[in-house]
Structure formats: C-alpha cells, structure tokens
Image: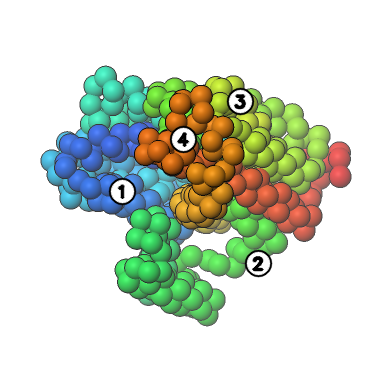
C-alpha cells in the first residue's frame, strides 16, 4: 500500500479490518452462552446442540489455510468484502432458523465466510503499517481479537437473558455494516492471479483438517476411540493429512505452499502459538464451568471474571506493540509472556471451594498480561522473513495453527476433567468409611453418623465436590506446565534483523 510505503497509516483501514476480525471472534464466543437456550428452543439433546459449534469450527478450520490461494485468485479487496457480506447474511439466517438442521447448515456457511476474516485482517494490517511499526500493527489487531472474546460472554448473556437467543446473531449486523462501508470506501483494488485450482490437494486438505477438528470437538462426548465414528475420523484424518503433505511437497502449484515452514522462525512460531493456545484457551474453556458448577456463580457474574483478563491483555498489547518491541528482543518478551501464562494457571491451580471473585479474576489478569507479551512479539518473529506476496497464505496457516491449538486445549481439558473426576472419586471413596474418624468428625456437628442414610449421602456429595475440585486444579497445573515447556522453543528462533522492527537492544 502506498500509505505504508510512505510511512503513513490509513486509520480508516485499521478500524475496518479490526472490526472485521472482531466480527468473527465475537460470534464464536457469544454463541456459546446462548447454546442451552437454542437447545431448548429446538428440543435438541446436548450432543445434537454441539453441532451448532462444531459445524462452524470445522468449516472455518478447513477454509482458513486457503486464504492466500483465494486472495490471489479473486483479489484481497473482493475477498474480504465478500467474506464480511456473506458472514453477515449467514448471521441473519442463523437468527431466523426454524430447526436445528437449518441453523447447523447456516453455521457451516458462516464458518466458511468467517475463516477469511482474521487472516486477511492480519495481513492487511501488516501492509497498512510500515515494516518497522509491525509491533503497533499487531497490538492494534490483538486489541480487536482480545476485546471481542471478553465482550462475547457478557453481551451474549444479557441478550439471551433479556431478549432472545436470536439476538446473538443479529448483533453482528451493525459491526458488519460499519466494516463493510469502511472497507468499500478505503481499501484499494489489487491485482489478481489466474491460478489453477488444485482439486486433489483441496480434497485431501479438507479431509485431513476437517476430520481432525471433528475428532477434537466430538471425541469426549463419544468416548474417543471406543466410538466407531471417531475411529473412522482418525484414520481419515491421518490418511488425508499424509496424502496432502506428499502432494504439496511433490506438486508444483499446490493449493497451500508448505515451503513456508522451511523458514525456521515461521515453523517454530507456529509450534509456540499452538502450545500457547492449548494452555490459554484450555483454561478459559473450563473456567466458567468450574465457577458455575462448583462455586455456584451465576452465568453473568462468571462472564465478569473475564473483564480483568481482557483489560490486562489490551494494556499489555498496547505497551508491548508501541514500546517494548522497539527496545527488547521479541524472544525475551514472548518467553516472559509464556511464563506469566503459566503463573496464571498455577494460581488457579491453588484455589479452594471458598475462592472469591478476585481470587478467580487475578490469575486471569496475570495471564492477560502474558497474552499481550506473547502475541505481538511472536507475530513479529513468525513473519520476519515472509515476503508481502506470501503474507495472506502465511497468515492463514498461522491462524489455523492457533485455532487447532485452541481446539486441542478444549478437548484435552474436557477429557482430563472427566477422567480425573472418576479417578479422584474412587481414591477418595476408599478412604471415607463409617470407621474413619475424619468422616465421623465431619458429620458430628450435623448430628449424623457415616453409617446413616443421610450421613452417607452428605459424605458422597462432599466426595464428589472434592474430587471435581482436584480434577480442575490438576488441569490448571498441567496447562501451566505446558506453557513452561513451550519456552525453550524460543531459544531456537532467530532474532529480527536490525531495522525490521527497530533495533533490538536486549538479548
């Protein structure tokens, strides 16, 4: 872009692409809150209702790596305008849905359009800012991506509680309309390339990634490999992924250029962002269930727990992007961010059943500070050597890796909690007998004994609560260890060259 080349930034384009990114992230978090209401409206089971989420994520994760290819074929401007329009249209259709089947189909289409929004927004921002100000670009982009998830649960809870679940889809319209108007007026036309469609590569990519995402989303509810459907999906994912890798390496003009991973920083940054996403989003996924089921927090108040996290993350991104990346080695900043993410999880891993609001919120704020310190420097490291022509494709791959890491995290924590609950219940039950002095002392103030029916029921209920608490605390600690285990990968990244992001002063 000419503005970027001249060192000037077009603020209208910046606002437009941030709104576009917010559109996709807001929708993905806001729908989670409304899911029980949608399930009740259509008389669906819990397993059936999860397809409202699964259909969106699977279609998005399949399409996202194709961003670079489609942008070259139809043009970046035309693609993002089409994506925003299609996303908004499908949002309306979701809000007007008359059955579970129709909303799943519309969510599938919505995910296909939404898949382009974040990668395109990121690459357009890279072009809008001069190369030495990429930290600021990623800080601005990160603000949009962070604010939306914080707003999502709270806004979704209010709309669902006081209006209707259908409003969580209609709320997308003003955001989409503003983004569309700004993009149409300011984003310049770009050249297209009449590249041929690699149908074989596309099919294998869709099978490989789509089946993997299906396994991650549905594995826990179907008891993983004990389900024939999951077994078939795992085999299909392995064959599709292996076939795609061989095809992409041997065929010229493959639909996704895997040679991008030959760049050391890009490959390592993808591994780090995946591990970071597992640790961060795994914890975020189970925190509402933890506080609602064990600590009896209402839905709206559990949403408020994310506000300090969002404020800390936003402040961290602004300071990191505008100040810190110009003075410190981005590898050091990302390492500090991963350390703070680990500390936040360890803090959650030390809670008890009497934890108050701020005992739950402070760990989120610590992790939020870490989020800003990881996201901005890691984006700089990842795209350090990527040419402008390949930024759309690289951004698509980087974001699909983050999405898969998030899905792995959510799948892992769900399994860990369920399996841990079974193990902990069995272990605790072995030690609680009618002859256990601690059990007798626990029931004595209530005038009960362990061998009475009411006393046994109370003990059983307490065993379940404590077993569940231990399961959650173990998961939080495991996620903290994972964040720590990711830090050594930063040692193998190359520092940005002087002048790429401004001179690096600390090593």
Precedes in sequence: disc 3 or disc 4: 3
Task: Report which quarter residue 165 is drawn in.
Answer: top left
Q: Residue 359: which disc?
A: 3
| Residue that label 1 marks | 50
- Mark 3–mark 4 contact, CB under 8 Å? no
Where residue 84 appears, as percent x and y from the top left, is: 34, 39
Mark 2 to mark 1 CA distance (whole Å):
37 Å
The answer for how far apart the CA atoms under marks 3 and 2 are is 44 Å
Question: Element under label 3?
Answer: helix
Q: CA distance from mark 2 to mark 4?
A: 68 Å
Q: Which quarter of the figure has residue 152?
A: top left
Residue at 30%, 30% (x, y): give it. Answer: 168
Disc 3 to disc 4, C-alpha distance: 34 Å
Of badges 3 and 4, nearer the viewer stands: 4
Residue 8: image location, x then y, percent: 62, 30
User: Which residue bears the numbered disc 4?
Assistant: 449
Q: Residues within 10 Å of mark 2 (few under 14, many from 20)?
A: few
> Which of the image's four quarters has the N terminus?
top right
**Could you classify mark 4 by the number of other residues whose Cα lies within 10 Å: few (under 14), some (14-19), or many (20 or more)?**
many
Quick one: label 2 or label 4, which is nearer the N terminus? 2
Q: Nearer the viewer, residue 124 or 379?
A: 379
* Upstream in sequence: badge 3 or badge 2: 2
Image-based side of 78 in relation to 103, left or right: right
- Alpha-carbon span between mark 1 and mark 3: 31 Å
- Disc 1 crowd, CA 10 A, few/some/many (<14, 14-19, 20+): some
Q: Quadrant of the C terminus?
A: top right
In terms of secondary structure, where does tag 2 sit? helix
- Residue 262: mark in rendering: 2
């Amino acid at each position: 872009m000419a503005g970027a080349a001249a060192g000037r930034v077009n603020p209208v384009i910046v606002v437009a692409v941030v709104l576009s990114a917010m559109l996709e992230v807001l929708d993905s978090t806001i729908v989670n809150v409304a899911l029980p209401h949608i399930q009740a409206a259509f008389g669906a089971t819990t397993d059936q209702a999860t397809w409202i989420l699964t259909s969106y994520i699977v279609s998005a994760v399949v399409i996202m790596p194709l961003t670079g290819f489609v942008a070259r074929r139809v043009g970046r401007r035309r693609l993002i305008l089409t994506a925003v329009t299609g996303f908004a249209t499908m949002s309306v259709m979701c809000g007007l849905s008359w059955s579970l089947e129709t909303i799943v189909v519309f969510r599938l289409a919505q995910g296909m359009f939404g898949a382009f929004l974040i990668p395109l927004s990121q690459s357009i921002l890279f072009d809008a800012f001069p190369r030495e100000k990429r930290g600021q670009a990623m800080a601005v982009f990160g603000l949009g991506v962070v604010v939306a998830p914080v707003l999502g649960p709270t806004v979704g809870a209010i709309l669902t509680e006081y209006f209707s679940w259908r409003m969580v889809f209609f709320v997308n319209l003003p955001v989409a309309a503003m983004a569309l108007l700004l993009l149409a007026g300011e984003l310049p036309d770009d050249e297209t390339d009449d590249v041929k469609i690699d149908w074989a590569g596309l099919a294998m990519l869709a099978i490989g990634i789509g089946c993997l995402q299906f396994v991650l989303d549905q594995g826990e509810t179907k008891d993983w490999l004990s389900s024939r459907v999951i077994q078939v999906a795992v085999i299909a994912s392995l064959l599709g992924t292996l076939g795609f890798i061989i095809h992409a390496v041997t065929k010229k003009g493959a639909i996704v250029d895997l040679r991008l991973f030959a760049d050391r920083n890009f490959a390592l940054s993808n591994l780090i962002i995946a591990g970071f996403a597992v640790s961060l989003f795994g914890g975020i996924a189970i925190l509402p269930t933890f506080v609602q089921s064990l600590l009896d927090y209402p839905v709206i108040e559990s949403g408020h727990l994310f506000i300090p996290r969002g404020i800390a993350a936003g402040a961290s991104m602004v300071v990191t992007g505008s100040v810190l990346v110009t003075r410190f080695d981005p590898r050091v900043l990302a390492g500090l961010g991963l350390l703070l993410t680990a500390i936040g999880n360890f803090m959650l891993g030390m809670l008890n059943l009497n934890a108050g609001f701020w005992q739950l919120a402070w760990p989120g704020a610590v992790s939020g500070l870490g989020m800003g310190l990881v996201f901005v420097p890691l984006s700089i490291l990842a795209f350090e050597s990527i040419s402008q022509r390949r930024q759309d494709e690289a951004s698509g791959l980087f974001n699909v890796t983050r999405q898969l890491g998030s899905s792995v995290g959510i799948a892992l924590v769900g399994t860990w909690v369920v399996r841990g609950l079974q193990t902990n219940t069995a272990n605790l039950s072995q030690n609680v007998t009618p002859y256990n002095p601690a059990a007798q002392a626990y029931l004595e103030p209530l005038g009960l004994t362990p061998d009475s029916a009411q006393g046994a029921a109370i003990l059983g209920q307490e065993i379940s609560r404590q077993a569940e608490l231990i399961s959650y605390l173990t998961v939080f600690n495991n996620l903290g260890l994972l964040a720590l285990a990711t830090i050594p990968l930063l040692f193998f990244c190359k520092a940005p060259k002087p002048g790429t992001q401004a001179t690096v002063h600390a090593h």
